[in-house]
Image (cartoon, coloured by chain):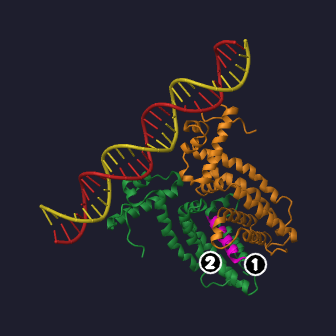
Chain colours: A orange, B green, C red, D yellow
Amino acid sequence: MTGQVRTVDGRVAGRRGQATRQKLLDCLSEMLSSSPYRDVKVIDVARKAGTSPATFYQYFPDVEGAVLEIAEQMATEGGQLTELLAGRSWVGKAGWQTSQELVDGFLEFWRRNDAILRVVDLGAAEGDKRFYKIRMKILNSVNNSLSDAVAELQSKGRVDKDVNPAAVAGSLVAMLAAVASHQKGFQTWGVKQAELKPNLALLVHLGVTGKKPTK
Amino acid sequence: MTGQVRTVDGRVAGRRGQATRQKLLDCLSEMLSSSPYRDVKVIDVARKAGTSPATFYQYFPDVEGAVLEIAEQMATEGGQLTELLAGRSWVGKAGWQTSQELVDGFLEFWRRNDAILRVVDLGAAEGDKRFYKIRMKILNSVNNSLSDAVAELQSKGRVDKDVNPAAVAGSLVAMLAAVASHQKGFQTWGVKQAELKPNLALLVHLGVTGKKPTK
DNA sequence: TCGGTAAGCTGACGGCATGACAGGACAAGT
DNA sequence: ACTTGTCCTGTCATGCCGTCAGCTTACCGA
């Protein structure tokens, strides 16, 4: 499948090597959660993993390289997000439920992976194609489903013709991602988690169907 | 007002000093546009400004400190965003125009300041209160206006009672900011700039009024 | 059991950025 | 010209980066 795991200098990693590698990745993940991306140093990660910087460089070209690895793993898990929309209806009460469950699942996924997603977002915004592709991989599953849903409703005449399904879907997905990243920010605006979700679901439903949900 | 500009060691900066300081800020701004935040080094900024690292440290505690300065300046200019909504109507054709102009102005502002906004966003997401406050300062102007608009329509019975104005407004603002940050991303989804704007405006209008715009 | 071979790890090193300081250059007033 | 306070930089100790040679460990076939 993905081929063997290799060290920077071309050797194949065995059991022990892979364990060390994974430990480094885990420690890096922790560091990303606890300190600013800019301040994450190779030496700190290595120390935390109980090994030396030289070992780190055996498995990863640099911090960024290791981050990409973590992000890739997460993106693969992120494929589950597709299930939030596969075969769901956007009509009537079912539509409202679909919308709610999408918001719920999305926010939960983002909250679980917030540290790494922050970095992926930054990399993507800075124009780094590698991060960009990973971000796409995660969002595409949701985006395509949403886009299809809009397009289908459009073909039935339930949505205006001058709506661009991809643009609407992309904007909604971007909204979900942004709100998830700044969930704490809403508290300062006096909005609690529990209140936020239904309002987000409302916006998603409005965006996809153009109509208020029937609850 | 803001008091005198001071160096790190407490001296008051004169004409020449302020010029140097500003030059350093300008060069830092440029660097942020052209290279990843993580790789921006004091020595590079200093070289670009035709001075030495020591000079940089005379005016700023570190790179982050200087970035905060730039962000603060930008946040002040960002007050202009309020004008996009002050005294606008959300009813009928006027409502559609309000929505369009908001999207236009917002995207333009974000595009002009994308480099620094990326960093502010990251800092805020990482939980740094200083960046967080700056992000609020920028978004609040728009957010409050939007929130008021929703609340007003709500009091007139045109919007459902269980809608939380602050949550909806915050989500819409987050959407605008996120889409602006990843404008390039939409091109890969086959969505052009020109197509994006009206669809965003539609979503904003739907979110605020709960109805499709009359064009 | 015993090498042989490849994987795994680290000490050590040159290079570079950081951050602090003291002292020299410069402008302005007297 | 002299003084004063601002402004800049040479220099230095410190610490991280990224690489390499070389040592240790695990696996495997004879």
**Would you say residue A151 is visible in this rendering?**
no
**Camera-nearest residue between B87 and B57:** B57
| Location of residue A53 in the rendering, given as x and y in whole percent from the top left corner | 55, 39
Q: Which residue lies at the image location 67% right of the left edge and 52% below the top edge?
A: A133
* Mark 1, secondary structure of its residue: loop
Q: Amino acid at mark 2?
A: Asn
Chain of the residue under label 1: B
Marks 2 and 1, Cα distance to the nearest angstrom? 18 Å
Mark 1, residues whose alpha carbon is within 10 Å: few (<14), some, or many (≥20)?
many
Q: Give the numbered dot on residue B210.
A: 1
The answer, for residue A78, to whether it is visible in the render is: yes
Q: Amino acid type of disc 1?
A: Gly
Frontmost of labels 2 and 1 is 2
Task: Give whichever of discs 2 and 1 has the lower sequence position.
Answer: 2
Q: Is residue D29 above or below residue B106?
A: above
Element under label 2?
helix
Residue under pointer 2: B144
Q: Confirm whether the magenta stretch covers residue B170.
A: yes
> Residue B183: image x %, image y %?
63, 63
Q: Which residues are magenta?
A: B164-180
Q: Position of residue A79 (x, y in %)?
A: 77, 52
Residue drawn 65% across the image and 41% down it = A23
Residue displayed at 60% across by 36% down: A8
Q: Relative to residue A106, is residue D17 drawn left or right?
A: left
Quadrant in the picture for the N terminus of chain B: bottom left
Give coordinates of residue A42: x percent, y percent. 55, 44
